[in-house]
Amino acid sequence: MNIVICDDGKENMNRIKLYVEEYLKVHYIEASLFSTTSPKEILDCDTVFDIAFLDIQMPEFDGITLAKELKRRNKRIILFFITAFEQYQDEAMDLNIFRFFAKPFDAQRLYSGLDKAMEYIDKAYIDIYLENDRRYIKLPIDSIKYIQRENRQNAVFTDNGVYNVNGDFKELINRLPNTFFYLVHKSFYVNLHYIDEYRYKEIHIDGKRIAIATRKQADFHKYWFNYVKRS
């Protein structure tokens, strides 16, 4: 997880950094924390951030402009704005900000906001263990196109590549929501958002034909059209 703090006031930036570091330590959360007084320094780096604490009124770039760029890099980013200027709130709301902190801000509100942010991340991401690299990574759930069981391995196809994961297929898919995922075959768990074409006996995702098990075809047919109505 990558967290950025940007406030042109160094004292305020360091105070936020101290609180965030304390929160991460108490909750045993591993994260890379980047803090700066310069918005340009953030724009010039290519890091994709998961959480951002941004001052709104800064001399180089205002926080709204910076937030738009960070959101372009990661549409799931959690944005916290820190400002003493209420006139910016309407524009900031268009970015689906997570919370406003008024200056001088309350540390307890910051901790409460981070609690909510972690709840959101827990629901929006899944931890998977990559056996070859011997590391855990967080995958955004809505980036997963489908999971295919291949013997004793599971291939997780995402919009950012394919990850091979050891372990029980059923345990893995049970960690994903069933609101827009569906087990169309004993070896395929698919994300309905990524279906390019549906026929009664098969679906297509990224040009790959995935057969729907015979005993599941009628139920999936109903499920698909209910999904279409909701969309």
Image: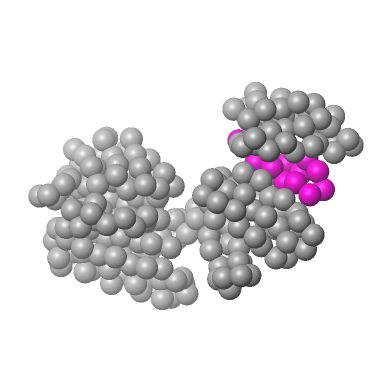
**197 sits left or right of 6 in the view:** right
Task: Provide the residue span drawn in magenta.
Answer: 180-193
Quadrant containing the C terminus is: top right
24 or 86: nearer the viewer: 24
Residue 149 covered by magenta stretch: no
Q: Is residue 44 left or right of residue 152?
A: left
Judged by its main secondary structure, the magenta piece is strand
x and y percent of residue 81 in the render? 28, 50
Q: Which residue is found at the position 53% from the left and 63% from the top?
A: 137
How has the structure been colored for display? one colour
Q: Is residue 52 above or below residue 220?
A: below
Q: Residue at x 69, y 33 (%)?
A: 204
**126 vs 118, nearest the viewer:** 126
Question: From where the camera sits, is residue 132 visible?
Answer: yes
Seen as rendered, the residue at the extreme left is 59
Quadrant of the rendering where the N terminus is positioned? bottom left
Residue 101 position, x and y percent, is: 27, 53
| Quadrant in the picture for residue 23 | bottom left
Residue at (72% x, 46% y) in the render: 189
Residue 7 visible in the picture: no
User: Residue 220: which quarter of the image?
Assistant: top right
- Residue 190 part of the magenta segment: yes
Name the residue rendered at 27%, 35% in the picture.
90
Q: Give the x, y percent position of residue 163.
A: 60, 57
Work out whether 19 lies above or below 204.
Answer: below
Q: Residue 15 at what x, y percent from top left?
A: 23, 68
* Number of dots carrying numbers: 0
Closest to the observer, 117 or 171:
171
Q: Residue furthest front?
A: 207
Above or below 122: residue 87: above
